[in-house]
Amino acid sequence: MTEKQFDFSIIMEDESPSSSVPKDVWGGIPIKEDKKGPKTIAMILFFGAILILFQSYQDFLLHSAEDISDEEVETLLETPNSQSDVQISEEQYQQFHDDARDSNGFIIRAIGLGIAGFLVLVGSINTFRLKQTGPVISTTGATIGLISGVYGSQLIRLASDANLSGALLLTYEIFVYLCGVCMFVCGAFAALPMINARARKAMKGNFWENVELINPNEVNESEE
């Protein structure tokens, strides 16, 4: 009886080519998570949100007030009148306030900055907790604040052009650009954790947890 011998070759691959490549490596450069960076940004955004909400509240009060008290007007006009040859009367400032209210500049800025401040506040908390939704919410809020803040400030500036002059007129003009720059910077800070690779890796619930970065050169070498 002829004994038949059967050779079985079983190839056991403990590791696939992709698993031989360490996670968090791209082009030979390891990517380490950065938890401190997003938390620092979250704290900055938190205080920024408080300032935005404070400005929103001030605009709401200005829109709600039919007239400004004489004492407040005197205080507001004291410095501008001392720095200019053209004096602004209390009646002119009251008329400016009425025109700004009628144009809805105060209420547009109040509502827009209120929504923006709330979203930035919520986003900053989520960012501090390293949740991926944090930067998205904060960036959305900053965008809303940028649009509404600049538009509302522009309406107020147009009202000031018709009634004011000198340094006070320049103040309201500068405030349009200042509002835009501040909200743009706020949005840029909020978006940083989405741009920086180390910060993205530290955020919870993002694609870094499910995707392994593989160096194509090492994969090709292992297949050969």
Image (cartoon, grey):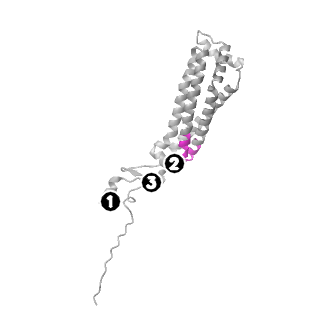
In the rendered structure, which disc, 3 or 2, sits on the residue that comes first in sequence? 2
Which residue position is annotated with label 1? 222
Q: Which residue is mark 3?
A: 211
Q: Residue at x 60, y 19 (%)?
A: 159
Mark 3 in CB contact with mark 2 (< 8 angstroms):
no
Q: Amino acid at mark 1?
A: Ser
Q: Quadrant of residue 81?
A: top right
The residue depicted at 70 percent of the width and 27 percent of the height is 64
Local SS, label 2: loop
- Three-letter code for the amino acid on which mark 3 is drawn: Val
Q: Quadrant of the N terminus?
A: bottom left
Distance between the Cα atoms at labels 3 and 2? 14 Å
Instruction: Confirm whether the magenta stretch covers residue 130.
Output: yes
On residue 81, which mark appears?
A: none
Local secondary structure at mark 1: helix
Q: Which residue is at the far front?
A: 102
Of circles 3 and 1, which is in front?
3
Q: Decide: is 165 above or below 185.
A: above
Q: Is residue 191 above or below residue 170?
A: below
Q: In 3D space, how far apart are the residues under numbered discs 3 and 1 (Cα atoms)?
A: 20 Å
Q: Residue at x 57, y 47 (%)?
A: 129
- Give amino acid for label 2: Met
Range of magenta residues = 124-138
Marks 1 and 2, Cα distance to the nearest angstrom?
Answer: 32 Å
Q: Vertical placement of 63 versus 186: above or below?
A: above
The residue pinned by badge 2 equals 203
